[in-house]
Amino acid sequence: MKNILAFSFAFLFTLASFAQSSTSNPQKFLSSLSEHCGKAYRGEIVSPNPPADFKDKELIMKVVSCKEKEVKISFFVGEDLSRTWVFTLEDGKVKLKHDHRHQDGTPDKVTMYGGTATNTGFADMQFFPSDQETVDMMSSIAGNVWWVTIKDNKYTYNLKRVDSTGFFSASFDLSNTVETDKMPW
């Protein structure tokens, strides 16, 4: 009986140690983004009916900053360097915010909107429904849901407005870096 109890405690201790040391899906997601720190990639709109200000423009994403709990990815649309996606890990979940800047570096009047994942998601995909801060800023986008995937050497940024049949999706080829000296505003 002592051997069975000793074995059971040892097994439970090992299992608990493994559970505590394993990396969560949100941590894996941020780690996957961080693997591309300092690199830039060309992208394309893969959804129908691209927004007019994106049409026929070069799209580049550049992973500009990587910290343990925060990754910033700039999204360049032609010569417009105003957009940066900010991913942070807070309370075990990933948050996505859209940092928009003017050319002089000052914040746009509509900036830092986005959402927080409602669960731990997947290691290669996270969903971000509009958070309350975003709804307070722009009630018209209360139904927005963003999601990002990192899979099969592709980074894909997506937006769905629940009050619309359309969606926006841009995909970036992570197997082919591009050289750029562009930096966000």
Image: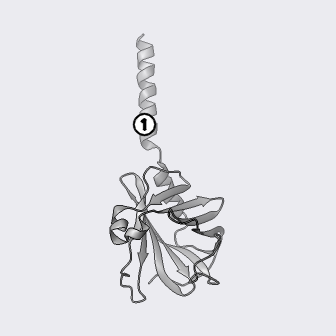
Vertically, is 52 above or below 15? below
Q: Nearer the viewer, residue 160 or 10?
A: 160
Q: Is residue 66 visible?
A: no
* Image side of residue 171 versus residue 80, left or right: right
Report which residue position mark 1 lands on: 17
The residue depicted at 56 percent of the width and 73 percent of the height is 39
Q: Residues within 10 Å of mark 1 (few under 14, many from 20)?
A: few
Vertically, is 88 above or below 44? above
The residue depicted at 35 percent of the width and 53 percent of the height is 91
* Image side of residue 47 versus residue 120, left or right: right
The residue depicted at 44 percent of the width and 21 percent of the height is 8
Which colouring convention does the figure follow?
one colour
Count of marks overlaid on the render: 1
Q: Quadrant of residue 69?
A: bottom left
Residue sticking out furthest to the bottom: 104
The residue depicted at 62 percent of the width and 82 percent of the height is 55
The C terminus appears in which quarter of the rendering?
A: bottom left
Indicate the position of residue 50 as horizontal and vertical percent values: 61, 76
Q: Nearer the viewer, residue 100 or 10?
A: 100
Indicate the position of residue 13 as horizontal and vertical percent values: 41, 30
The N terminus appears in which quarter of the rendering?
A: top left
